[in-house]
Amino acid sequence: MGDQTAIEWADATFNPWIGCTKVSPACDHCYAAVSTPARTLGVSWGAGQARRRTSAANWKLPLRWNAKRFMACGACGWRGECDAELIGCGRCGSMDVDDTRRRVFCASLADVFDNEVDPLWRRDLFELILKTPNLDWLLLTKRIGNAGRLIEEQRLRHARYFDEWAFSEGWLKGEPPANVWLGATVCNQEEADRDIPKLLALPARVHFVSMEPLLGHVDLEHACGLGRGIPSWDDSADVAADAMALRYGDTSRLDWVIVGGESGPGARPMHPDWVRSLRDQCAAASVPFLFKQWGAWAPDDGRHSERMFVYRSGMSDIPDFRVPDPANDGETEMAPVGKRKAGRMLDGLHHDGFPS
């Protein structure tokens, strides 16, 4: 949690509370459950386990960020806070700098739409988002199916002021907060088919998916329901969809796709063709694509004694002495080299797409 993060697609992270329940195969090796904050505060993961609200000092951080000037350098890619009078890049000195918006990932150690969280905490979070219009809040959830109902609950039962009521009312009626990007985490085709239509049914300034860890091939056209219509989160959402289409254009498509492999103890390898397919699907649909990392495993370059055969179907096997046969379900060798060494280049390139 804090002002800076190593996450490639965010500038900062904010956790209003800590704690969650594993709900997906992607959660099997959850980093948050064994993170230093979770261990230090004694937070246990699981249904019925208490979530821990973070400190008052932590809740003040976004207010400070909102008041600070934030800039990006077109020459070296630096992004960061700067003094009001700064006119050049804080890293390379280039004059190719512009004011930009800080991207805040919420939440890396919890889930905003966890239905086991005190709803008054979520009310306080929405109020904080209202008070920080200079920040872009990236709300990423594994529970997108809960989102519409919990936003509606805030409007009906927990709003204290008109602005809080209007925040939730407008969100569901086609006037979503201008500083909220709504994202869903999916790891395979089953989750994509189930959750991406639910994501697209909710009004949002930006719709995005994070596929990390990616555990199988995903056909986004199938998941997005193109040509089939997008199911509504409730009976009134058709009106919201019409309003969104007028305001923002086509809402039956994703605005951003993030892909990454698994890291940490027990990490599962990601087949390179799964990533290439998503890269190519995004290119064909003109959707920004960001490849975050290979994770613990990388395509083998022939120099590693420890390897694994990985197949497009998701199966894996200990290799023998034969040469991998791509005709055999895309058979390829992956090596456990570690996240840092594996890097984030795909076919010799970095892919750092962001919504405009």
Image (cartoon, rainbow, N blue to C red):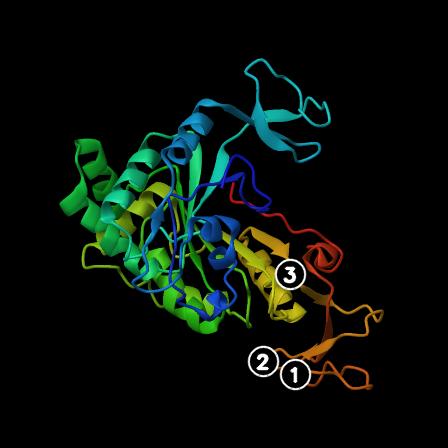
Residue under the image location 62 percent in, 64 percent down: 275
Given contact means CB atoms under 8 Å apart, are the residues at marks 1 and 2 in contact?
yes
Identify residue for label 3: 295
As drawn, is 201 to the left or to the right of 321?
A: left
Residue under the image location 28 percent in, 41 percent down: 175
Identify residue for label 1: 329
Q: Camera-side residue: 133 or 201?
A: 133
Note whether 21 is above or below 352 in the view shown.
below
Label 1 secondary element: loop
Q: Earlier in the sequence, mark 3 or mark 2?
A: 3
Q: Residue 313's mark?
A: 2
Label 3 secondary element: loop
Whole-number angstrom distance, CA of label 3 to CA of label 2: 19 Å
Whole-number angstrom distance, CA of label 1 to CA of label 2: 7 Å
Note whether 37 is above or below 87 in the view shown.
below
Report the amino acid beneath label 3: Gly
Mark 2 burial class by Cα count in 10 Å: few <14, some 14-19, many 20+:
some
Q: Position of residue 28 (x, y in %)?
A: 49, 69
